[in-house]
Amino acid sequence: MLIWCAYCQHYLGEKQPYESFEMTHSICEKCCESGRHKDRAHIREIQPIAKFHADIRDKAVQGEEILIEQVLAESKRLGISSVDMAIGILQPVLNEMGRLYEEGKVTVAQEHAFTDKLDRMISDLFALSPAMKNCKEKPPLVMLTCVDGNYHWLGLRLLELNLLEENIPTRAFIPSLPRDEIIQLAANLRPIVLGLSVYQKEQCAEASSIRAGILQRTAGAYAPIMAMGGNGAKQLLEEKGLEQWIENEIGFFRQSLDFVTYMKTCLPLMSAV
Ligand code: B12
Ligand SMILES: [Zn+2]
């Protein structure tokens, strides 16, 4: 299920059951701290957002034309931020399309057309703000890429934008890089965290292997903290019955928001080392 704050209309992430793309409401930390929840007059129903989400989904499923400008104008009117629009509305529609495709309810062509539309919408949503552009040009604290042969890079794009918006210098290399180039680039850029996107569970093994490759290349002088995400990481976490799993400098994350929270909490500590 998708959780939104009913007070400020901010996307708060997913919760079980993940197969459901229904919306439910909660309250975010900021609204809680400000005591807004004590005054029920501040509650704004999330129904308009749920309807907006359902309309996009229905159009995608029925193969109807989705007009990017119209969708973006409506999201602005509803007061939805760019990041929330991308990960709270567009990401679930894409995932649902994937599920419907598996069930034979939408065609490959429809799924591809929506993926393409989404890619363009993300670019329009994030026509880089000067602050984000400035942040992207700084030496990266986070380097992101997909493991060799993984062409599921939309998620990584969303994650990069999410991190840049939080003012965390990030550089994503998409669609993917060969293993040796990942090692070489990381050894040169020396980010605190190297994030890899994997679409198969078996690809999770790349985390320790690439980390070992970097250690070897830098003669033991440097190795990043590894972060793993994407469908392969989700599969691993599901098997373990965990929401996230961090052990021996390698973390596995379900959603971009979990990783952003991790970075915001740990970055001051990591930078001090
Ligand atoms: C869209 C899609 C595609 C698109 C990808 C477009 C693109 N450029 O990204 C295309 C059409 C190219 C594609 C191709 C294939 N796909 Co596909 N695809 C999907 C689909 C429907 C959605 C994935 C997606 O983009 N979700 C939305 C994004 C935003 O979510 P996300 O990727 O999970 O990313 C979020 C988080 O995971 C996280 N995250 C992602 N990366 C990282 C990294 C780090 C470090 C961190 C911290 C977090 C993080 O942040 C993101 C934002 O919140 C899924 C099904 C599904 N419902 O998941 C199948 C799916 C992933 N695909 C699958 C398959 C099998 C394929 C193909 C082999 C199909 C084929 N027969 O050709 C090819 C493989 C291509 C390849 N070699 O990579 C399978 C994988 C199953 C498996 N374990 O093998 C899935 C699960 C569908 C299925 N059930 O069969 N696919
Ligand atoms: Zn709120």
Image: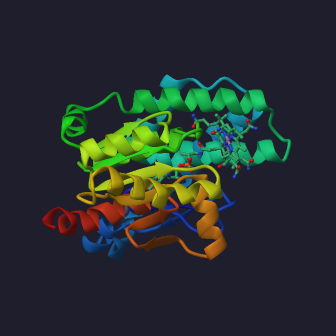
Is 137 or 14 nearer to us in this picture?
137
In the image, residue 246 above or below residue 74 = below
Where's residue 197, x and y in %? 51, 49
Q: In which quadrant of the rendered image does the N terminus lie?
A: bottom right
Q: Hey, which residue is sitting farthest right in the picture?
A: 104
Q: How is the image coloured?
A: rainbow
Residue positioned 58% across, 27% down in the render: 117
**In the displayed structure image, the side of residue 134 where residue 214 appears, left or right:** right
* Picture coordinates of residue 100, whole percent (x, y): 78, 45
Q: Position of residue 153 (x, y in %)?
A: 52, 39
Q: Nearer the viewer, residue 238 or 5?
A: 238
* Residue at far left of view: 272
Q: Quadrant of residue 108?
A: top right
Q: How many marks?
A: 0
Task: Residue at 27% x, 62% y: name it.
Answer: 264
> Which residue is drawn at the image coordinates 48% and 72% (left, top)?
245
Residue 186 seen from this side: yes
When the figure is inspected, residue 175 is found, relative to residue 211, above or below; the finding is above
- Pick the front one: 196 or 132: 196
Q: Is residue 44 visible?
A: no
- Image x and y of residue 251, in percent: 44, 66
Quarter of the image holding residue 257?
bottom left
In the image, residue 65 sits, relative to residue 235, either above or below, namely above
Q: Which residue is rendered at x = 64% and y = 57% of the image?
A: 202
| Residue 268 appears left or right of 52 | left
Quadrant in which the C terminus is drawn? bottom left
Dividing the image into four quarters, tell me where ligand 2 lies.
bottom left
